[in-house]
Amino acid sequence: MTAQTLRHLVNLDILISDIDMLTSEEIASEKHSKLLDSIRRELSSLEVSVEDETHYGFQQLLHGTALQHGIKDKRMLVIYHRLLGYILQHWRASTKIHAILDSQFDNHADERLELLRVKRIRAKSQCKTIILAMGQSDARYFLKMFGLEQETWLLDNYT
C-alpha cells in the first residue's frame, strides 16, 4: 500500500464521518454538497491510486474503513463517483431553478429554466438507473453512508 492510497482512504473516512455528524438541517445543504464533492474527488484519486492493485489487495486496503462494506471491487469507485456527480447535478440544477423562480425572473428566465429542468431530469434519470442496477441493499447502504436517505426520489424504485 502506498502512502498516497492510505491518505485517500483516511480522507474518505474523515469525510464520511463528517457527513454522519451533519444535523438534519444540514442534510442536502451547501455544506453537505461540499462534502459530497470532496468525496467524489477522493474517490477519483483513489481509483487512480489502486489501478494496479489486485482484487484481493484492494479488499485488504478497504478492510477497517468506512467503505469496506459498500465497495466490493474497484469498479464501485467509478460507480460511486458517477452517482454522487449525478446527485450533485440534480441538487445544483434544483437550487438554480428555485433561485430563478424566486427572484431572477426576466426575459431569458424561461430559456434558463427549461435548460435547467432538462439537466435536472437527465441527472435524476441517470441516478435512478444506477441505483436500480445496484440493487436494494447496496443502494440503501450507499444512501445511508452519504447521508442521502432523505432523497425520496432516489428510493422511488423500492417503495
Image (cartoon, helix red, strand yellow):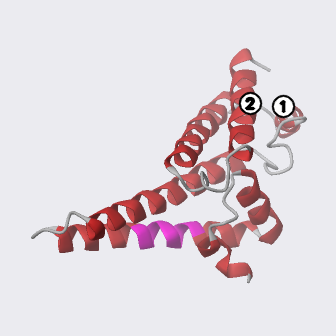
Q: Which residues are magenta?
A: 120-127
* Residue at x 52%, y 42% (from the top left corner): 34
Residue 80's spot in the image, x, y percent? 65, 51
Residue 17's spot in the image, x, y percent? 75, 39
The picture quadrant where one finds residue 95 is bottom left
Residue 108: in magenta span: no
Q: Is residue 114 above or below residue 31?
A: below
Q: Are marks 1 and 2 in contact (CB under 8 Å)?
A: yes
The one of 122 and 49 positioned closer to us in this rendering: 122
* Mark 1 element type: helix
Residue type at mark 1?
Answer: Leu
Where's the C terminus, which quadrant? bottom right
Q: Earlier in the sequence, mark 1 or mark 2?
A: 2
In the image, is 56 to the left or to the right of 115? right
* Residue at x 61%, y 55% (from the top left corner): 25
Mark 1 sits on what residue? Answer: 61
In the image, is 5 to the left or to the right of 39? right
Q: Is residue 142 above or below residue 66?
A: below
